[in-house]
Image (cartoon, rainbow, N blue to C red):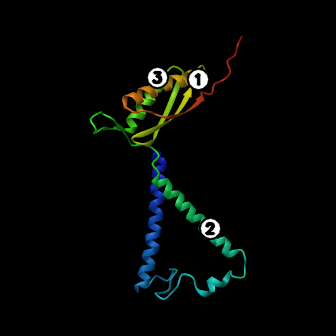
Amino acid sequence: MSPVLRTVNRVVVGLVGLILVVAGGSVLAVGLGVSPPSWWIYDGRHDVLLSRADRYRWRSDGWWWPVVIAVLAVCVLLALWWLVAQLRRRRLAEVLVDTGDGEGALLRGRALEGVLVGEAESLDGVESARVRLTGRRSAPHVRMGLLLEPHAEPGAALQRISEDALGHARDSAGLAALPAEVRLRAVKHHAERVS
Protein backbone atom coordinates (compact mmCIF):
# COMPACT_ATOMS: atom_id res chain seq x y z
CA MET A 1 0.00 0.00 0.00
CA SER A 2 1.41 3.39 -0.94
CA PRO A 3 2.17 5.95 1.80
CA VAL A 4 -0.59 8.26 0.53
CA LEU A 5 -3.22 5.50 0.66
CA ARG A 6 -1.96 4.42 4.07
CA THR A 7 -2.35 8.00 5.35
CA VAL A 8 -5.83 8.35 3.84
CA ASN A 9 -6.78 4.98 5.32
CA ARG A 10 -5.64 6.04 8.80
CA VAL A 11 -7.42 9.40 8.58
CA VAL A 12 -10.70 7.80 7.44
CA VAL A 13 -10.51 5.10 10.12
CA GLY A 14 -9.72 7.74 12.74
CA LEU A 15 -12.64 9.96 11.71
CA VAL A 16 -15.11 7.08 11.58
CA GLY A 17 -13.90 5.86 14.97
CA LEU A 18 -14.18 9.35 16.47
CA ILE A 19 -17.72 9.80 15.12
CA LEU A 20 -18.79 6.40 16.48
CA VAL A 21 -17.23 7.06 19.89
CA VAL A 22 -18.84 10.50 20.18
CA ALA A 23 -22.26 9.24 19.04
CA GLY A 24 -22.15 6.13 21.23
CA GLY A 25 -20.80 8.05 24.19
CA SER A 26 -23.50 10.68 23.91
CA VAL A 27 -26.26 8.04 23.76
CA LEU A 28 -24.72 6.30 26.78
CA ALA A 29 -24.40 9.56 28.70
CA VAL A 30 -28.01 10.55 28.01
CA GLY A 31 -29.14 7.03 28.94
CA LEU A 32 -27.31 7.31 32.26
CA GLY A 33 -29.17 10.51 33.11
CA VAL A 34 -26.89 13.32 31.90
CA SER A 35 -29.06 16.13 30.60
CA PRO A 36 -28.19 16.90 26.97
CA PRO A 37 -27.89 20.40 25.48
CA SER A 38 -31.01 21.88 23.91
CA TRP A 39 -29.73 21.37 20.35
CA TRP A 40 -28.98 17.65 20.84
CA ILE A 41 -31.07 15.05 19.02
CA TYR A 42 -32.21 13.35 22.27
CA ASP A 43 -34.38 15.07 24.85
CA GLY A 44 -33.79 12.73 27.75
CA ARG A 45 -33.15 9.20 28.93
CA HIS A 46 -36.58 7.94 27.82
CA ASP A 47 -36.29 9.37 24.30
CA VAL A 48 -35.98 6.96 21.35
CA LEU A 49 -34.00 7.09 18.13
CA LEU A 50 -37.08 6.89 15.92
CA SER A 51 -40.45 7.85 17.29
CA ARG A 52 -43.63 6.07 16.19
CA ALA A 53 -44.47 9.03 13.93
CA ASP A 54 -41.02 8.87 12.31
CA ARG A 55 -41.30 5.13 11.74
CA TYR A 56 -44.73 5.38 10.12
CA ARG A 57 -44.18 8.62 8.19
CA TRP A 58 -42.98 6.88 4.98
CA ARG A 59 -45.02 3.69 5.41
CA SER A 60 -47.47 4.57 2.66
CA ASP A 61 -44.66 5.16 0.15
CA GLY A 62 -43.61 1.87 -1.40
CA TRP A 63 -40.11 3.07 -2.23
CA TRP A 64 -38.96 4.02 1.29
CA TRP A 65 -38.10 0.69 2.93
CA PRO A 66 -36.44 -0.87 -0.16
CA VAL A 67 -34.23 2.22 -0.42
CA VAL A 68 -33.34 2.05 3.27
CA ILE A 69 -32.52 -1.65 3.04
CA ALA A 70 -30.47 -1.12 -0.16
CA VAL A 71 -28.44 1.70 1.40
CA LEU A 72 -27.75 -0.35 4.52
CA ALA A 73 -26.77 -3.37 2.39
CA VAL A 74 -24.33 -1.23 0.39
CA CYS A 75 -22.83 0.11 3.63
CA VAL A 76 -22.37 -3.43 4.96
CA LEU A 77 -20.78 -4.59 1.69
CA LEU A 78 -18.41 -1.61 1.66
CA ALA A 79 -17.43 -2.30 5.26
CA LEU A 80 -16.76 -5.96 4.46
CA TRP A 81 -14.73 -5.02 1.39
CA TRP A 82 -12.66 -2.61 3.47
CA LEU A 83 -12.11 -5.25 6.17
CA VAL A 84 -10.91 -7.82 3.62
CA ALA A 85 -8.62 -5.20 2.05
CA GLN A 86 -7.10 -4.50 5.47
CA LEU A 87 -6.50 -8.14 6.28
CA ARG A 88 -5.05 -9.08 2.92
CA ARG A 89 -1.30 -8.61 2.78
CA ARG A 90 -0.35 -7.10 -0.50
CA ARG A 91 3.40 -7.35 -0.15
CA LEU A 92 5.49 -10.20 1.21
CA ALA A 93 7.51 -8.96 4.19
CA GLU A 94 10.08 -11.77 4.31
CA VAL A 95 11.26 -14.85 2.42
CA LEU A 96 12.36 -18.05 4.13
CA VAL A 97 15.82 -19.05 2.88
CA ASP A 98 16.81 -22.71 3.25
CA THR A 99 20.28 -22.72 4.86
CA GLY A 100 20.54 -26.50 4.98
CA ASP A 101 20.76 -26.70 8.77
CA GLY A 102 17.02 -27.12 9.33
CA GLU A 103 16.69 -23.67 10.88
CA GLY A 104 16.55 -21.43 7.82
CA ALA A 105 17.05 -17.71 7.61
CA LEU A 106 14.71 -14.83 6.85
CA LEU A 107 15.40 -12.48 3.98
CA ARG A 108 13.58 -9.17 3.91
CA GLY A 109 11.14 -9.03 1.01
CA ARG A 110 12.02 -5.42 0.22
CA ALA A 111 15.69 -6.36 -0.05
CA LEU A 112 14.94 -9.09 -2.58
CA GLU A 113 12.65 -6.72 -4.48
CA GLY A 114 15.42 -4.12 -4.57
CA VAL A 115 17.93 -6.63 -5.92
CA LEU A 116 15.49 -7.77 -8.60
CA VAL A 117 14.80 -4.16 -9.62
CA GLY A 118 18.52 -3.36 -9.79
CA GLU A 119 19.36 -6.42 -11.83
CA ALA A 120 16.41 -5.94 -14.18
CA GLU A 121 17.24 -2.28 -14.80
CA SER A 122 20.86 -3.17 -15.54
CA LEU A 123 19.80 -5.36 -18.49
CA ASP A 124 20.03 -3.91 -21.99
CA GLY A 125 16.70 -2.63 -23.24
CA VAL A 126 15.06 -2.19 -19.83
CA GLU A 127 14.49 1.42 -18.84
CA SER A 128 12.81 0.83 -15.48
CA ALA A 129 11.35 -1.99 -13.41
CA ARG A 130 8.85 -2.42 -10.60
CA VAL A 131 8.82 -5.57 -8.46
CA ARG A 132 6.42 -6.83 -5.81
CA LEU A 133 6.69 -10.09 -3.88
CA THR A 134 3.46 -11.83 -2.94
CA GLY A 135 2.53 -15.31 -1.78
CA ARG A 136 3.88 -17.16 1.26
CA ARG A 137 7.34 -16.71 2.67
CA SER A 138 8.25 -20.30 1.81
CA ALA A 139 6.77 -20.00 -1.70
CA PRO A 140 7.06 -16.41 -2.93
CA HIS A 141 5.61 -15.16 -6.20
CA VAL A 142 7.06 -12.24 -8.17
CA ARG A 143 5.02 -9.58 -9.94
CA MET A 144 7.24 -7.51 -12.17
CA GLY A 145 6.50 -4.60 -14.46
CA LEU A 146 9.12 -3.64 -17.03
CA LEU A 147 9.29 -0.48 -19.08
CA LEU A 148 11.22 -1.32 -22.24
CA GLU A 149 13.23 1.10 -24.34
CA PRO A 150 12.08 1.69 -27.93
CA HIS A 151 14.78 -0.54 -29.46
CA ALA A 152 14.24 -3.49 -27.05
CA GLU A 153 12.86 -6.80 -28.23
CA PRO A 154 10.22 -8.06 -25.77
CA GLY A 155 11.06 -11.76 -26.25
CA ALA A 156 14.77 -11.25 -25.66
CA ALA A 157 14.13 -8.99 -22.66
CA LEU A 158 11.77 -11.54 -21.12
CA GLN A 159 14.31 -14.34 -21.63
CA ARG A 160 17.09 -12.27 -20.00
CA ILE A 161 14.82 -11.42 -17.05
CA SER A 162 13.87 -15.06 -16.62
CA GLU A 163 17.42 -16.41 -16.86
CA ASP A 164 19.39 -13.63 -15.20
CA ALA A 165 17.37 -11.66 -12.64
CA LEU A 166 14.82 -14.29 -11.63
CA GLY A 167 17.30 -17.16 -11.91
CA HIS A 168 19.83 -15.43 -9.66
CA ALA A 169 17.14 -14.55 -7.12
CA ARG A 170 15.82 -18.12 -7.08
CA ASP A 171 19.31 -19.62 -6.67
CA SER A 172 20.49 -17.14 -4.03
CA ALA A 173 17.35 -17.65 -1.90
CA GLY A 174 17.60 -21.43 -2.27
CA LEU A 175 14.08 -21.70 -3.69
CA ALA A 176 12.97 -24.68 -5.73
CA ALA A 177 10.85 -22.39 -7.91
CA LEU A 178 10.18 -18.67 -8.21
CA PRO A 179 7.05 -18.16 -10.31
CA ALA A 180 6.75 -14.73 -11.85
CA GLU A 181 4.24 -12.62 -13.68
CA VAL A 182 6.03 -10.12 -15.91
CA ARG A 183 4.21 -7.28 -17.63
CA LEU A 184 6.01 -5.50 -20.43
CA ARG A 185 5.36 -1.97 -21.66
CA ALA A 186 7.28 0.07 -24.19
CA VAL A 187 8.41 3.64 -23.67
CA LYS A 188 6.29 6.07 -25.66
CA HIS A 189 8.42 7.81 -28.25
CA HIS A 190 7.95 9.99 -31.30
CA ALA A 191 8.34 8.58 -34.78
CA GLU A 192 11.80 9.03 -36.20
CA ARG A 193 12.08 11.15 -39.30
CA VAL A 194 14.00 9.59 -42.19
CA SER A 195 15.56 11.92 -44.70
Q: Earlier in the sequence, mark 3 or mark 1?
A: 3
For the residues labelled 3 and 2, the Cα–Cα distance comes to 52 Å
Measured as percent of width and height from the top left, residue 101 is found at 26, 35
Residue 5 location, x and y as percent? Answer: 49, 49
Q: Quadrant of residue 154?
A: top right
Task: Provide the residue designation for mark 3.
Answer: 122
Q: Which residue is mark 2?
A: 71
Residue picked out by circle 1: 155
Q: Residue at x 58, y 85 (%)?
A: 51
Cα–Cα span, label 2 and label 1: 50 Å
- Whichever of callouts 2 and 1 sits on the residue coming sooner in the sequence is 2
Q: Looking at the picture, how far across and down is residue 53, in whole percent?
A: 63, 86
Q: Is residue 98 left or right of residue 79?
A: left
**Which residue type carries mark 3?**
Ser
Q: Amino acid at mark 2?
A: Val
Front one among 74 and 14:
74
194 shown above or below 8: above
Q: In the rendered view, does 108 fall on the left or right side of 193? A: left
Q: Residues within 10 Å of mark 1 (few under 14, many from 20)?
A: few
| Location of residue 135 with respect to 121 vertically, above or below | below
- Identify the secondary structure beneath mark 3: helix
Element at badge 1? helix
